[in-house]
Image (cartoon, grey):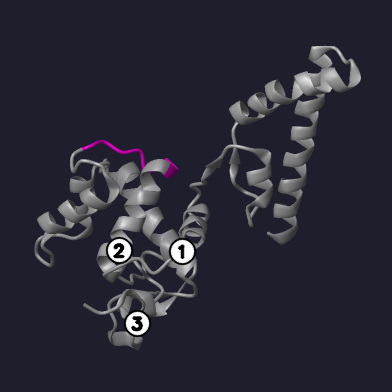
Amino acid sequence: MAAPRSSRGYRNRNPGNIDWSANNPWQGQVSKEDGLSGRFAVFESHEYGIRALASLLIRYQDRHGLNTIAGILHRWAPGSENDTGAYVAAVSRATGFAPDERLDLHSYACLRPLVAAIIGHELGGQPYPAAVLDEGLRRAGVLRAVGTLGEAAATGSGQAAITVGSAAAAAATAAPGLIALGGLPQWLGVALVLAAAAIAVAIVLSKRRAVA
């Protein structure tokens, strides 16, 4: 088996081997392969190819009600061209999801492993580091949730999701320290921590706008 980076899908920066179609002007799509005779789309970057793959899976769920590995892959890789049963079994093993388990493809926890497994099957292995996969999903609108403001600030795009729960946890942890250091009332310590969290989020979002 050829190495993943030698595969057709990798060369096209189209790791899902998505067909070119004039009806699907994907973001970052630049052409069809091999001029007019080619079948598959070519993307300007691998991240855009991953975005198209993730977006198409979300479309399968939203437009066609397909939210299981078996349902998705029978449309993605029909039996007329593929051993669909083997494909389903391979993706199920790689993700840990049962073939008929219902998934939420707007969720990073479901979409990320499914995208990675399909790429691995299509290309004969996984050539992409985690950051490239995550960036492709981010461009499709699916973000990896982070647990702390520090993790959010460290993300290259500044668009990682910051949960209310993580901010509340930070406040609960930090407030006793503020009380001990400054003799402040607990409510004031919590308010100060939440204010700092809000400032950090504002900085991250302003950086995002600056590079948009």
Residue 199 position in % (x across, y down): 79, 37
In the image, is residue 90 part of the stretch drawn in magenta?
no
Give how far apart the Cα atoms at labels 2 and 3 are.
21 Å
Residue carrying label 3: 33
Q: Earlier in the sequence, mark 2 or mark 1?
A: 2
Relative to 202, is 132 above or below?
below
**Residue 172 position in % (x across, y down):** 69, 21
Q: Is residue 79 left or right of residue 202?
A: left
> Few, some or many C-alpha atoms within 10 Å of disc 2 (few <14, some 14-19, many ≥20)?
many
Q: Of marks 2 and 3, which one's residue comes earlier in the chain?
A: 3
Q: SS class of the residue under badge 2?
A: helix
The residue tagged 2 is 120
Pointer 1 residue: 129
- 208 is higher (above) or lower (below) than 65: below
Instruction: Report the span colored magenta.
Output: 101-108
Disc 3 residue type (three-letter)? Glu
- Crowdedness near tag 3: few (<14), some (14–19) or many (≥20) residues, C-alpha within 10 Å: some
Say which label, 1 or 3, has the lower sequence index.
3
**Most prominent secondary structure in the magenta stretch?**
loop
Please name the amino acid that badge 2 sits on.
Gly
**Tag 2–tag 3 contact (CB < 8 Å):** no
Q: Could you say where residue 95 lies in the image, as x and y percent from the top left?
A: 29, 48
Q: Quadrant of the C terminus?
A: bottom right
Q: CA distance from mark 1 to mark 3?
A: 25 Å
Q: Residue at x 23, y 37 (%)?
A: 101
